[in-house]
Every structure is written in C-alpha cells, then in structure tokens.
Amino acid sequence: MIKEKAIETLKIESKAIDDLIPRIDDEFEAAVNEILQCHARVVVTGMGKSGHIGRKMAATFASTGTPAFFMHPAEAFHGDLGMVTENDVVIAISNSGESSEIVNILPIIKRIGAKIIAMCGRRESTLGKNSDYFVDIGVEREACPLGLAPTASTTATLAMGDAIAMALMAKKKFTSQDFAMFHPGGALGRKLLLTVADVMHVDDENPIINVGKTVKDALFVMTEKGLGAVSVIDYNNKMVGIITDGIIRRAISKDKSLLDEVVENIMFDKPLTILPDKLAAAALSVMEKHKPRPITVLPVVNADNEVVGIVHLTDLLRQGIV
C-alpha cells in the first residue's frame, strides 16, 4: 500500500506537469514580456500552500536577475499594499481563483495601477477575470486521496513558476557570473568570483631562485617558504623552470653530489603556469588534469612571462574551490 500510493502520487504529479506544456502559449509569452518590461519589482502573492510556493518563486526570481519579493495577502490588506507601486507586476497565485484574501486585494492593486498576472486553475474565476494575464496552472486532480490537500496543484504551480523564471533568464542572457554576484557567500560564488590573484603567494611568500644558484640553495628557499616548490627565474625575472621537493628527492637519491649542482641541471624547464587574472577554479583544473599525475603547485606569470606568484593546492581548498 505504501509503495503503491507513493508511485501513484508521483504519476499524478508528473502528469500535472506534462499537462502544462500546451499552456505555454502566446499569453504566457506576453506575461513574461510584461515582466521583462517591468522596471520595478515582481510582487508574488498567494495564501496558504500557494503562498509557500510563491515565496519560493520570488526567491528564484530574485536570485536569477529579476527583482522580486513575496507579499502575504492578509498582511497586504492591513498595510503591506503600500509596498506595491504602479510600476510593479503582481503575480497572484490561487488554484481556485476565489481565495478571499487574494480577491479582496485585487481592487486596490488595480487602483494602484500594477499589472496582474493570475496563476490560476480557472480563467472564469474572480482572479482570472480581473487579471491582465492568465497563466493556467489547473490540474485534473490532486494526488491527495481525499482530493483536498494541495499536491498536484502546488507541484504544477512550482513548475510553472520555474518556467517563467528560466524564460526570463534566457531572455536576459543571465550568466553564471551574474548568478555568482547574487550568491557571493556560496561555493558557486567563490568558484566564479575568486581569481588566481586573490589566492596566490606573492613578494616574500613567493619562492623564487635565480639561475646559477645551487640545488642546495633551492632547497633552503623551498624549506623557508613551505610550499614544496621553487620557481627558477633568469635575471630579468622571466620564468625558466621549476624545482619541486619531489624533483630534488629523486635527484639526490641517485647522486647526493647534485646538491652542489646549479638548479638548471635538475629543474623542469617546461612548467605549467597560469595568469593572475584567471579564475582560481581554472588553476585547480590545470593542477588536476596534469599528466601523468596531478600537481600541487602552479607558478603565476604575467603576460611577459615574469613570475609574479605561486598557487598551492591547499590555498584553493581553503577557499572552497573544490
């Protein structure tokens, strides 16, 4: 009984979403264009379960480049309508189209002059007849065995709200960088906003050594800076190679006298590098994709191939670039 009812619920709600597809019509497009032309805010309102869906819709709009907020219809009738201006677009959600709290504020919204988009299951309802645009979210039946608890109808409303939001995103050419700007505290924001310059070691923290110095000198610099690598530069600060602790270990395991050799004799002369204005996430990608095995350090050079810093894998992990 448990599995059967759960499967039946999913099938009913899945059908409710499928039934929305033919309703993406010219009026739907006109409603989206009205929002696009709005230079103020989208005000989403709904009562009960519709209100919960409305809050999510407003949050999705706001985070994807469409200024929006949720207005509780009962509070609206007691003063919150002062938040609505004639330049706003109001999305009113009511499956029946007769929710008293929604119906009661329609005349005031009309008087203010804001456009009304009805998300409703009945065009002939009070809400449907008194809106500028009608978006049909009606369902054949609820998944609730009593036909009472909003289930399929709220799922359909949520899906249609997402359809509006995604259509707006596409029309606005909203990018991942735009999304990151509105989510600076999240992992995505860190990946898309942090550059190599933000995380690299520079100046006294940047392990460098000139050509002509010995491997022993490189080992001392490497130990002092604690990053497990040293960038080898010429006397014009140009990148010529890199020495890592692994290179040194492998070299002296074969011949301890190599500690007195110049760094050019054991350095890797074709190191991977990255520019400081590249994304920190790009640095991680370079490290992870290095063959035959990933690397943990990446020298940073400018456009003239001058060494300006170095990035260590732990710096990226510390910033949440994973």
Image (cartoon, rainbow, N blue to C red):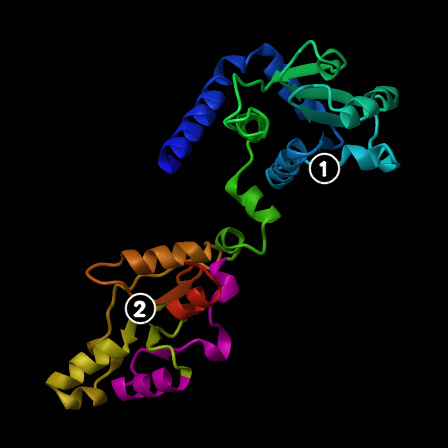
Is residue 216 depicted above or below 236 in this figure?
below
Give the quadrant of residue 78. Answer: top right
Task: Give the labeled residue for mark 2.
Answer: 240
The amino acid beneath tag 2 is Val
Q: What amino acid type should be assigned to the residue bearing mark 1?
A: Phe
- Given residues 235 and 149, the one toward you in this image is 149
Spatial CA span between label 1 and label 2: 59 Å
Q: Residue at x 49, y 64 (%)?
A: 319
Mark 1: give few (<14), some (14-19) or many (20+) Cα within 10 Å. Answer: many
Lower position in the chain sequence, tag 1 or tag 2: 1
Residue that badge 1 annotates: 70
Q: Magenta stretch?
A: 195-224
Please tell me whether residue 60 belongs to the stretch shown in magenta: no
- Residue ID at (29%, 66%): 295
Q: Nearer the viewer, residue 101 or 173?
A: 101
**Nearer to us in this view, 193 or 34:** 34
Residue 290 appears at what percent x and percent y? 26, 59
- Would you call the spot at circle 2 few (<14 residues within 10 Å), some (14-19), or many (20 or more)? many
For label 1, the SS is strand
Classify 116 as above or below 42: above
The vertical placement of 42 against 279, above or below, is above
Residue 306 spot, x, y in % from top left? 42, 65
Left or right of residue 29, residue 215 in this image: left
State whether residue 255 appears in this view: yes
**Residue at x 50% of width, y 27% of height:** 145
Q: Residue at x 30, y 85 (%)?
A: 219
Residue 160 appears in the figure? no
Give the image location of residue 51, x and y in percent.
68, 34
Question: Is 218 one of the magenta-colored residues?
Answer: yes
| Quadrant showing the C terminus | bottom left
